[in-house]
Amino acid sequence: MSRDDAALEAFRQEIRAWLPEVCPASLRPDASGAAPTAEERKAWLDAFAQRGYTTPTWPKEYGGGGLSKHEVRVLNEEVTRFGVFPPGVSFFGTAMLGPVLLEFGNEAQKQEHLRKITSGEINWCQGYSEPGAGSDLAGLQTRAVRDGDHYIINGSKIWTTGANHADWMFCLVRTDPDAPKHDGISFILFDLRVPGVTISPIKLISGESDFCQVFFEDVRARAENLVGPLNGGWTIAKRLLQHERQMLSGGMPGGAPMAVPRKKGKKAEVPRPTSALAERAREYLGDSDGTLAEPVLRDRIAQYELDTLCFGLALKRSGEEAKAGHGAGAATSMFKLYASEANKRRAEIQMSVRGASGLGWEGEGFSANELMETRGWLRSKGNSIEGGTSEVQKNVIAKRVLGLPD
């Protein structure tokens, strides 16, 4: 065993002993009795945050774990083996704003905000799209005017996910209305609890309200929270969108990153996609011997799972390239485009499997899971719009990946 292998094995044993020490008993799979309390869930999260494991690859000086990619793999394997995952902190902070601050923020901004992201102390939301600036994001009109040590912000943002639960917003604002539209934009952070902020949830076709419209009337944002140079926000915005698309492609069913396979000897196991769709089909349409006789549906499920396997491997390869220092690039648009379509496809297959049981909206005669999945099918239609429409992604792929002319 090499020195590196021995160090990784020692780290594995440390994590394997640490997890049962810090995990509240009520959260474990074999727990019985009352459900875990909010305090117990927070204690479990705090245990990870104190070691920096909520953002394991970030530098330790900013609250991260400072782990190598091999150590992250071991950590993920042992958490999976233990069977109790820690409550997540805001992905807007960990997957979007945090990486941008690490790249573009000054030292004071990193010290002020990154630890609050890793601990879950502050929840973030994204202020990008506007009623008149969605796909053409550079056409945004929310204004920020310098006033001493602050910027005064007026305007509105729309489709702001989780704004009604967020504490702070990272926001694109126009700071030079006379400059070309890409050149007069800045990137600023501010507290949503200050006077002048009004948040209005938007009810979706699925019946949920995870999007909001946010209005700003003379909102005061500290000038020290301007990230990067004045009027240099478009470069930051594009980088953050790459992180967002990478996150979305990994977070949608059908686009979820696959677990890193464990090694047996010198050969790695081949990761296999989940068979949740097949199990659901057998539940509703299966024969007595557990097989699925409907050949067209069986083919659709098999093809979806094969495509999911290939996509998971492509994401894994991209993740390894990012860890090698290549970072998130225009290829994230390919992943976001494919994940959006895959998730919509999965929801359509689920509807085909359930038949009349998928027509429920409320009331008796339908299980809670059936009602949830019907609403999820409706919600999936937004996947090809959020995070940049599929048409925008195709344009990015054509220009930045394939090098096609305008």
Image: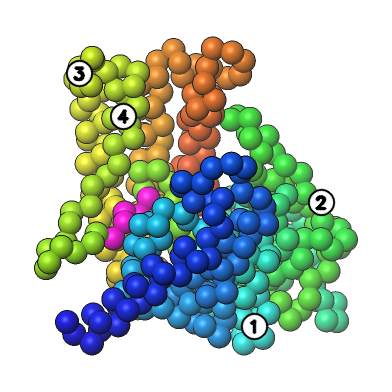
The answer to whether residue 268 is visible is: yes
Give SS at disc 4: helix
Q: Is the magenta stretch mostly helix, strand or loop?
A: loop
Q: Tell me the CA gap for discs 4 and 3.
A: 13 Å
Q: Which residue is drawn at 49% across and 51% down?
A: 28
- In the rendered image, which residue does mark 4 sit on? 279
Q: Tell me the CA gap for discs 4 and 2.
A: 45 Å
Please give the range of residues in magenta: 256-260
Magenta includes 258? Answer: yes
Q: Tell me the CA gap for discs 2 and 3.
A: 58 Å
**Kind of residue indicated by mark 4:** Glu
CB contact under 8 Å: marks 2 and 3: no
Q: Tell me the CA gap for discs 1 and 3.
A: 60 Å
Closer mark to the observer between disc 1 and disc 2: 1
Give SS at disc 3: loop
**Kind of residue indicated by mark 1:** Gln
- In the rendered image, which residue does mark 2 sit on? 198
Give SS at disc 2: strand
Q: Which residue is drawn at 25% across and 82% down?
A: 6
Question: Could you tell which of marks 4 and 3 lies nearer the N-terminus?
Answer: 4
Of residue 75 and residue 99, the one placed in the foreground of this image is 75
- In the rendered image, which residue does mark 1 sit on? 111
Magenta includes 282? Answer: no
